[in-house]
Image: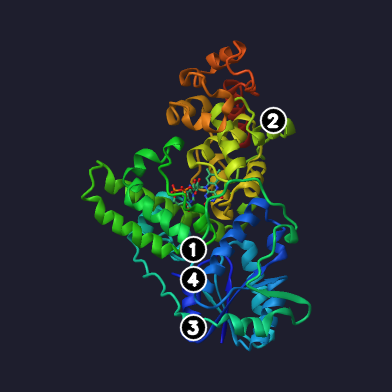
Amino acid sequence: MDLFWHRRDLRVDDNLGLAAAAGHGQVAPVFVFDDDVLEHASDVRVRRLLDGLEALRAAYRERRSDLVVAHGDPAAVLPSIASALGADRVVWNRDYSGLARERDARVRRTLAEADIERDAHHDAVLHTPDSIRTNAGDPYSVYSYYWKKWRDRDVDEPAETPDGAALLDAERLSADLDGDVGEDHHVAVGELPSPGSLGFEEPDVDLLSAGTHAARERLEAFLSDDVFSYEDDRDYPAREGTSRLSAHLKYGEIGPREVYFATERALEAAADRPEADAEASVEEFQGQLAWREFYTQVLFHNPTVVTANYKSYEEPIEWRDDPEEIAAWKRGETGYPIVDAGMRQLLAEGHMHNRVRMIVASFLTKDLLVDWRHGYAHFRERLADHDTANDNGGWQWAASTGTDAQPYFRIFNPMTQGERYDPEAEYITTYVPELRGVDPDLIHEWPDLLAVQRANAAPEYPDPIVDHAERRERALAMYKRARGEDPEE
Ligand SMILES: Cc1cc2nc3c(=O)[nH]c(=O)nc-3n(C[C@H](O)[C@H](O)[C@H](O)COP(=O)(O)OP(=O)(O)OC[C@H]3O[C@@H](n4cnc5c(N)ncnc54)[C@H](O)[C@@H]3O)c2cc1C
């Protein structure tokens, strides 16, 4: 009998490790709240994780089984559960981030000491992080070349869903496991902890539904319509033209193969669509799935990027540290409407639109001249879809320190970005109520906005905390010095 250890794959369908375990005999599914992981978690992510686990538990209960829930060090808990159940093998899907790899190596050792077999599968992305390489055999650092190879590779079919009979039934799980297992390991079959019992608080955020069922509904709705105009709409936050699958993909509530083949079917359907760029739009969406895999392999081959710049400069970048400006940015009170709308969306929903993530990240690093690590830490705390590889990739892109990053001299003007991507200020006024009723043209015009405030048209809205034109010059000088260049030239 096998134990299947769920981690970032909270689903029963299209789960390669689970399917392999079920092909071997009976399976008991387990999730372990790992203190080392919880140490880096946040109120929002714990809530989102619990929602995903609730949906996973329901999927097992529908199949007359249940989810075994434990709390502790997986290297100690898993051998105890395996021996209480008489399991001779523990199966899981690989997680490619650095911390997870270290933990998995420890788990392998303790299982080996207990004479329990280990079986790890590739599942989280379509192509393993070392399978797409340059012709010289190196990992890719430029996305467009990576994408060409990614696009042309064959993809394995989705994994088969285990037959209900392959899952250990709930009664047997409870009989063998409820209560303390091994040395003080608390195991509860089907019982999920509260955030409080894990040391977290219930966050005041409006999260989307979790789980495979919700993910499929979202995917189907998106691929039946919005995907065909994705290329035109994806940069406009008020249009809601993106899939909103990111948290589902982060927690593995839907399998990457299932998503990919659904996009392939959309590609076929694109020929009959009225939209001019329907096919290109579906490909553009596949390109975002490839970005996810690109950053997964960047992190896999360069685990130090979590804390260090990917790209080295000749001299250290002289970041500023201004706690008041950082706090205003976090609260969404910078006086720059699109930046504030994005930061307030993040606080309210644990999410932010991609274009706006790029704008607020540029603002923190190139207007406030603050180290990207401050921004990354805040996103890590607040985003429901926080994913080390993607979040780090996004931040280092914006800060011009990453792989295939934004060139240092490209500095978003937050006013023109707002004007271009939210012309009617619909997104802005959704999250910045102080500006409701103000003419969008004024919202997008820096001097007029000040005039509006002075005329008391938006008395509650804060004055801009910095002058973009002045900060832009300072940013250029900061990067030039880091490049060993004369900032005056
Ligand atoms: C500073 C910054 C931080 C970010 N942090 C995260 C993060 O923690 N987690 C995260 O999943 N994405 C992150 N992104 C990428 C992107 O913003 C989100 O994936 C996207 O907004 C999620 O919305 P969606 O599912 O509707 O995306 P869609 O446009 O529908 O894209 C589909 C999927 O492709 C993937 N994807 C899309 N864009 C990117 C990208 N640029 N890089 C990597 N994968 C991508 C995601 O899995 C996404 O769900 C970040 C981007 C920036 C600029």
Q: Residues within 10 Å of mark 1 (few under 14, many from 20)?
A: many
Q: Residue furthest toward the top?
A: 455
Q: Is residue 146 visible?
A: no
Residue 311, above or below 298: above
Q: Nearer the viewer, mark 2 or mark 3?
A: 3
Residue 1, above or below 388: below
Between 59 and 81, which is closer to the camera in this rendering? 59
Q: Which residue is mark 3?
A: 166
Q: Which residue is found at the position 57% from the left and 29% from the top?
A: 432
How far is the residue under mark 2 from the one under mark 1?
38 Å
* Circle nearer the N terminus (1, 3): 1
- Colour scheme in the image? rainbow
* Circle nearer the N terminus (2, 1): 1
* Circle nearer the N terminus (2, 3): 3
Q: Position of residue 60 (x, y in %)?
A: 53, 73
Q: Which residue is found at the position 54% from the left and 67% from the top?
A: 56
- Which quadrant would residue 170 be assigned to in this image? bottom right
Horizontally, residue 183 falls left or right of residue 278, namely: right
How far is the residue under mark 1 from the one under mark 3?
31 Å
Which amino acid is tagged 3?
Ala
Horizontally, residue 271 falls left or right of residue 457, namely: left
Which amino acid is tagged 1?
Pro
Q: Which residue is mark 1?
A: 129
Residues at circles 1 and 4 in contact by the CB criterion of under 8 Å? no
Q: Nearer the viewer, mark 2 or mark 1?
A: 2
Q: Give me the disc on residue 17.
A: none
Q: Give me the disc on residue 12.
A: 4
Q: Residues within 10 Å of mark 4 (few under 14, many from 20)?
A: many
Q: Which residue is mark 2?
A: 325
Which amino acid is tagged 4?
Val
Q: Is residue 95 visible?
A: yes
Q: Secondary structure at mark 3?
A: helix
